[in-house]
Amino acid sequence: MQHENSGSSSIGKSSLFGLDENISAVMVGAATLAVSFVPYASYFAWVVPVAAAIIERRSKLARLSDIQIFVSSAFISLFSWLTLVMTPYAEAAMESAAGNQLLTLGTLGVAMSLVKVVCLVCMILTTYNVYKMKVFHVPGITLLIKKIIKYSE
């Protein structure tokens, strides 16, 4: 699922504070992960990689990583909002003892939690691999992003 960046053997510079491209991308990943665990701010964790991707002009590897982290954090935010919206319905179903509704809401809650965990793992793996100057290939997403930003290995 991962592929070495077979471009130049030297580490390029990022537009973000003039840092090495892998360090810049790791900082964006770490900042996004940190914000993801702050109550209420976690709903907006996707803003960090979006800002970094907009600022980044030199390094396609850092930009690809930023966009991958954005997609993962956007999914986490989306499913967190959906969980927040579903909570009153779950409480109402528990009060009315409608077992069928409760089972459906419980199943949806577990499914949304699993999606959030998978996205979190993808964010961590993207951050880890970019530090090693590799691209972590998230199925379906990485190929689409590469076409959009015209990334070549």
Image (cartoon, rainbow, N blue to C red):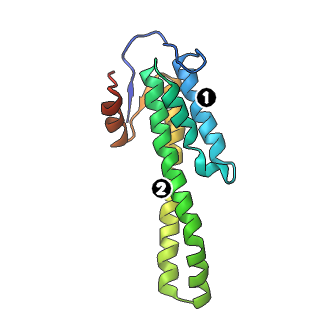
- Look at the image and tell me in which quarter the C terminus lies: top left
* Label annotation for residue 27: 1
Mark 2, secondary structure of its residue: helix
**Whole-percent x, y for residue 143 in the image:** 32, 36
Residue 36 lies left or right of residue 9; in this view the side is: right
Mark 2 closeness class: few <14, some 14–19, many ≥20 residues within 10 Å? some
Name the residue type under label 2. Val
Instruction: Give the residue pinned by disc 2.
Output: 115
Mark 2 and mark 1 residues within 8 Å of each other at the beta carbon: no
- Report the amino acid beneath label 1: Met
Q: Is residue 9 above or below residue 92?
A: above
Q: Looking at the image, which is closer to me, 54 or 106?
A: 54
Position in image of residue 132 (x %, y %): 50, 23
- Front of the two marks 2 and 1: 1
Secondary element at image label 1: helix
Q: Residue at x 55, y 60 (%)?
A: 81
In the rendering, which numbered label is found on residue 152? none
**Where the N terminus falls, by quadrant?**
top left
Q: Position of residue 69 (x, y in %)?
A: 50, 38
Residue displayed at 51% across by 58% down: 79
Tell which circle, 2 or 1, labels the residue nearer the N-terminal end.
Answer: 1
Q: How far across and down, in percent of the image, does residue 55 sit?
A: 52, 26
